Image: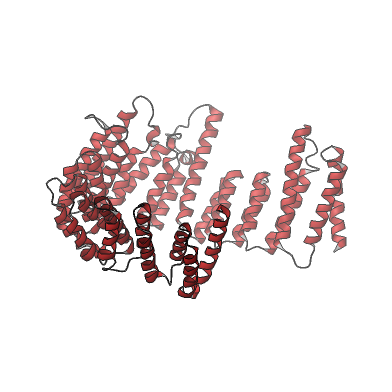
Amino acid sequence: MAELVHQNEEEMLQELEQMQNVGLFTSAEIKAIIRKRNAHEYKLVRKTKVKKDFLDYIQYEINLLALIHKRRKREHYFFKQDEIEYVIVSRIHRWFKQMMVRWADDLKVWTSHAAFCLKWNKKVQLSKLCTRMVQVHASNPKVWLLAAKWELECGDSMEKVRSLFLRGIKFHPKSEKMWLEYFRAELLFTEKRHRRFKMITKQDVNLNDEGSDSALMKGKAALIIYKNALQAFPDNVEMHLKFLDILSAFLATNTFAVSLFNEIKDDLSEIYNNSPKMRACLAKLHLKETLAGISFSGKHKEIEKHSRAMNCYQDFDKAVKEIDTPEMWSKYFNFALSMCQQSQPNQVSGPDSLFSLSSEQLMKVADHCHGNNILTCQQYIAWVDFLLKTGQLSSAYDVLCEVCGRRDEVELWLKRLKVAHLGNGENIDLNELFQLTCKFSNEMTKKQQEIFWSMWMQNCVVSDAEETAESVLTNKAVGCCCEAALALQHVYLKWMAVKYNVNHAYQMFMTKIKNTRTPTPEQYKDVLELLNLSPSVAQSTLQECYEHALHDHGETDPGLWLDYMKFLTQKENMKKCGHVYWRALKTLKPEFTDDFVSQHSMLKCSIKTRG
């Protein structure tokens, strides 16, 4: 084992001598490098090989290369790299190869080696690495994509890239990513050929020429990939649209991409003429800024946007005439709504503005969808929000009234209540509306219940309907969730405290709320917080409230005991405080006792610190 280490160290002597001779490192630093390498070498020759030892050694050598690079820049000395850096790089390649043999299943080892090859521009080693990697990890489609990407970035042969993609597709014919990246690679290669041709001849490629080379310059190889993908994925609309998304990135700078884009677009229009999703996506293509090399910039920006939006709406109008289905109308509605939301911050007035055009189209489409009961709940809510933002409160409420008459959906009824509140209940019997919505209370989520019941109580406060409020508390809201009960109680008790006094609010809590259902710890804490805010509340009243809370939740809530003890400490009733502490230890369940003791200790420390 030692003989191998000494042999490897002897092979390093020449590069170490060169480092010292050229002034990159001092004699002491060379000795430190030798000691460090010696330690790493002994780890590598162990009988049981460990991956971490190899990685640590490689990382040390990479750091050493970075330090050499900095020293060279400082000393302005850039000679003898083949005797120093390249020797170290070759050694790192050797260690990576050993790791790839021993731990061939670890993909990170392969990718780390590839990253190192890319950094040092080792094209030959990277090409061999790609070939070996796809042999070992042929079942992983990501490996084929990585290998093709590396070959495309630093390789000089597009044939190798095509070979990798074709072999990858042969192994994974149903991998969408493989087909899409193959398509992108051909476009990149075509773009590269165009740039090279322009650089040499100082003129653009004539796309009207015929011939095999001209076909490649026109992007026909990418078109063949698209055609084959259509056959491999016959009804995959989402994937077929991704070809247009990839191609759109090349439209602004490449003339060949425009004709290819239009050809694929026309082909998809013909194949999916009856597909609402495809028709909607194709209609939206007019908004792409890179389409035909035109961008949204300059003094004609708004005119151009308006023109493109008009083309989109014309395509949608044609689509809904040919495909008169709920899905097609729903997509038209979503598009018109999104256009209104995008254009509203910029322009909100003017008959020729983009917002005016979009809002007009939205109202036309929404009226048709509403009349035929096509819109979903979320679409109705989005439409109502748009009407509210544009100041059409009465129209929003009328829409909600009509749809609530047809559907029993909780979100729509709650939205109707909110809109009625915004109008301050003008010409609307809010109490009756709450009664009608109450029948859906069991279907509401916790958040919806909290909103509904607190809204009803706030309406009682505004209208000073105390009897209705008591009815809601003691009858209608008995089965609501704890969060809704807390929100309901908070509004009611605050109202009672303002209208009468805090003591009256506490009596209402004891008679109306506590007798109806057992309050939660949060409800008790809410009452106690209200009582503590008033200086007129007697100490005995607070102690009574604490005792009721501990009677109901003393077995499972250490926080209530601690709050009670804090209150007694503030009132300097230490004897009572000690008594409460022992009661807590006896009352709390065993699983809560340790938590109580630890929190009590922290409480005592904080009291001593303040003292």
In the image, 568 versus 233, the foreground residue is 568
Q: Nearer the viewer, residue 106 or 230?
A: 106
Tell me if residue 372 can be seen.
Answer: no
Give the quarter of the image for residue 262: top left
Coordinates of residue 536 in the picture (x, y in percent):
34, 53
Q: Residue at x 26, y 56 (%)?
A: 492
Query: Residue at the spot x=18%, y=58% of the render?
Result: 468
Out of 186 and 318, give the one closest to the viewer. 318
Q: Please identify the residue farthest to the top as the structure is shown.
A: 299
> From what the image shows, is residue 233 above or below residue 284?
below
* Foreground pick, 315 / 327: 327
Scheme of image coloration? secondary structure
Quadrant of the image containing the N terminus: bottom right
- Provide residue 34's location: percent of width, then percent of height: 84, 51
Residue 293 image position (x, y, % from top left): 40, 33
Q: Quadrant of residue 75?
A: top right
Q: Is residue 90 visible?
A: yes
